[in-house]
Image: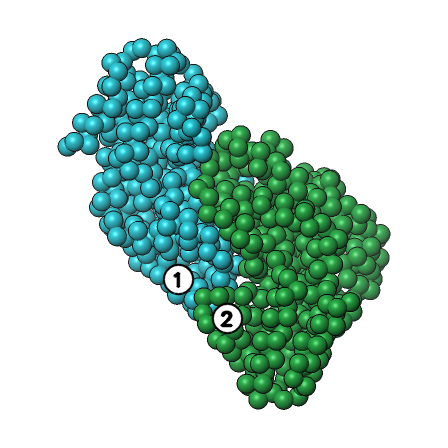
Chain colours: A green, B cyan
Amino acid sequence: MDDKLMLMIPGPTPVPEAALLALAKHPIGHRTNEFSNILAEVNENLKWLHQTQNDVLTLNVSGTGAVEAGIINFLSPGDRILVGSNGKFGERWVEVGQAYGLNVEPITAEWGNPLDPALFAEKLAADTSKQIKAVIITHSETSTGVLNDLETINSHVKAHDEALMIVDAVTSLGAFNLPVDTWGLDIVASGSQKGYMIPPGLGFVSVSPKAWEAYKTAKLPKYYLDLGKYRKSAAKNTTPFTPPVNLIVALHTTLRIMKEEGLESIFGRHERHKNATRAAIKGLNLPLFAPDSHASPAITAVAPQEIESDKIRSLMNKRFDIALAGGQDHLKNKIFRIGHLGFVSDRDILSCISSLEVVLSELGYENFTPGAGVAGAAKVFAQ
Amino acid sequence: MDDKLMLMIPGPTPVPEAALLALAKHPIGHRTNEFSNILAEVNENLKWLHQTQNDVLTLNVSGTGAVEAGIINFLSPGDRILVGSNGKFGERWVEVGQAYGLNVEPITAEWGNPLDPALFAEKLAADTSKQIKAVIITHSETSTGVLNDLETINSHVKAHDEALMIVDAVTSLGAFNLPVDTWGLDIVASGSQKGYMIPPGLGFVSVSPKAWEAYKTAKLPKYYLDLGKYRKSAAKNTTPFTPPVNLIVALHTTLRIMKEEGLESIFGRHERHKNATRAAIKGLNLPLFAPDSHASPAITAVAPQEIESDKIRSLMNKRFDIALAGGQDHLKNKIFRIGHLGFVSDRDILSCISSLEVVLSELGYENFTPGAGVAGAAKVFAQ
């Protein structure tokens, strides 16, 4: 049966019907009171979601554009920065830093392993002349399903005192507790097609007062990504450039839905889905790619050594219209990734796992007791 | 009567119902054959609309982001550029050039007047050492309703041979004949909420082989706006970053609608609406802000000296739910602007003009024969 797609990729994520209908409303003028009122509420709710009093700015860009804006607005050519790199996105921020002539020191871990906070602590402690201007971390590494230990790494950055903490929270914001003010995170970037439950097209950047101080002397060139312009406009409930009106109206809807559910429930739901998915995969005797200690609440990567991942994905698609993500770069065909980010229910996890059991059997994989995947998930849900 | 909004601003422009319904479709994965097939057709149709064999690249940015990408990908710090500046957007490209450390020479005309091609010819002819690397022109200056004489200015750029011709075609593409290949325009940037008939969120940049040559040695930093990445991905019918899937699907729909109508008919319709609107405004004895010789096919600016423009806009909104645009910067409250760009029918022009007559009367303006505005437009439509 076709045309009944179930998205279990890490973005775009499923969109509630109310948001789809909001998307389909005819655009209104963006220089009107009506739009300003929507924007004002959106901006307030973004602060609520980020648990911050900082500015949370909305840009018409993808998640990559948001992270790039979060980097280039606060640094100058030659600035020394540490960039955590243990997956596709960590590698990307290394590339961004290099493209802008920053003095980038990657701190690496193998794909599938978490970053070691001690390596950051060492570099930061040794930097007594305070040359390190920023530390960039991908919180949830979408490419591998690893959740890096941001809280610990951030504590070392706080101890250093000079460096800005820049966080790629693209697949962690709205999935995992990220108390921006309590932790003192300077820059947190994210994207709309993730925890926000709307289609791709918007990027978000929260900016601390300390980061705004750095902005004053930062010399990397920018215009469209110049966050100062967005801040100035946001203070007047408007935007520096024509905003994607329909996406903002849809976001207005989903932020209300999120507020209704509450942060604790949202984070609890993602934690539950992570645990249920992992228990299921263990029940199926398939290897999980990320360790339990550092598992992303948004995405679970599976490395089925006996079967090509792409065969599993292809059959999941064909038989059940379920979209799973594949591996990127050298992980192509080595892993598949189950997204459980955003508008995902317990039922969706059960659908996915039970379908996966059928697909594995059809592909001749017999190293599990039929029903063991679902049983693993069910045990978590029954708790 | 409320909730029956008629957008007569220069963007967002009206969106056909088919595109709104396409927008509301649940997003699909962007790394799928299904999406690649949509993208392939979109890219082909973008070339058709641009009348070019050049790459036409789609970015998740506003029109400003598209123009900025069109500038920074092909230049290096200190490069000398000429920037036409006779309105808000011309001024913006001067600012962009300055933000990136280019050696910007603005060539100005008063707001409401067209740029003088002779001034470009002079500078370009005098530049025998070929130091001028680019000329940037806003084709249709949205802030004033002036259509600059791109064809003539471009002929001087062609004679210079070294400089790239960079065009802000944000409110001219899809409204006015812009034969990219015939004229040899190197870079043409535009935005989705204009002639494309979909909401804001996408920017487009067409790039000539000559511009790609310049790209190879261009040193301004970029990553998200790096057009080389978009070109490489487009060749494989994919995108470098997560694209705004829903907007692309809506664009897929409107490009088919545009192809069905045909370029000649689209341009003819905009020309007719421009003429009808201008004839109407003349019938109402109100001053037009741009001269007939250089009037934009997308937008008509009116400068009603006896009445505050904002009063007219406000009453048009309140009485008839028609949104008109105001003046920007020093033109605030001095002009109002009637958008007739994109999905606008002859009937819309008549609705707008007849409503305007009522509003003018209610505001005590009596310097016209009742019906004279509509009569002016009707005469054009009857031809």
Q: Could you tell me which residue is drawn at 64 percent across and 78 percent down? A: A303
Query: In the figure, residue A153 lies in which quadrant?
Result: bottom right
Q: Which residue is mark 1?
A: B38
Q: Could you tell me which residue is drawn at 30 percent across and 58 percent down? A: B53
Evaluate whether residue B71 shows in this view.
no
The residue mark sitting in front, 1 or 2, is 2
Q: Residue furthest front?
A: A382
User: Rounded to the nearest whole Å, what is the CA distance between mark 1 and mark 2?
Assistant: 19 Å
- The front one of B91 and B15 is B15
Q: Indicate the amino acid at tag 1.
A: Ile
- The front one of B134 and A306 is A306
**Residue B130 x %, y %:** 37, 46
| Above or below A61: residue A230 | above
Q: Could you tell me which residue is drawn at 66 percent across and 39 percent down? A: A44
Q: Which residue is mark 2?
A: A321
Q: Could you tell me which residue is drawn at 67 percent across and 47 percent down? A: A260
Q: Residues within 10 Å of mark 1 (few under 14, many from 20)?
A: some
Q: Residues within 10 Å of mark 2 (few under 14, many from 20)?
A: some
Q: Callout 2: helix, strand or loop?
A: loop
Q: Assign the N terminus of chain B to one quadrant of the image.
A: top left
| Above or below B316: residue A348 | below
Q: Indicate the amino acid at tag 2.
A: Asp
**Residue A287 x %, y %:** 69, 80
Q: Callout 1: helix, strand or loop?
A: helix
**Residue B47 x %, y %:** 32, 55
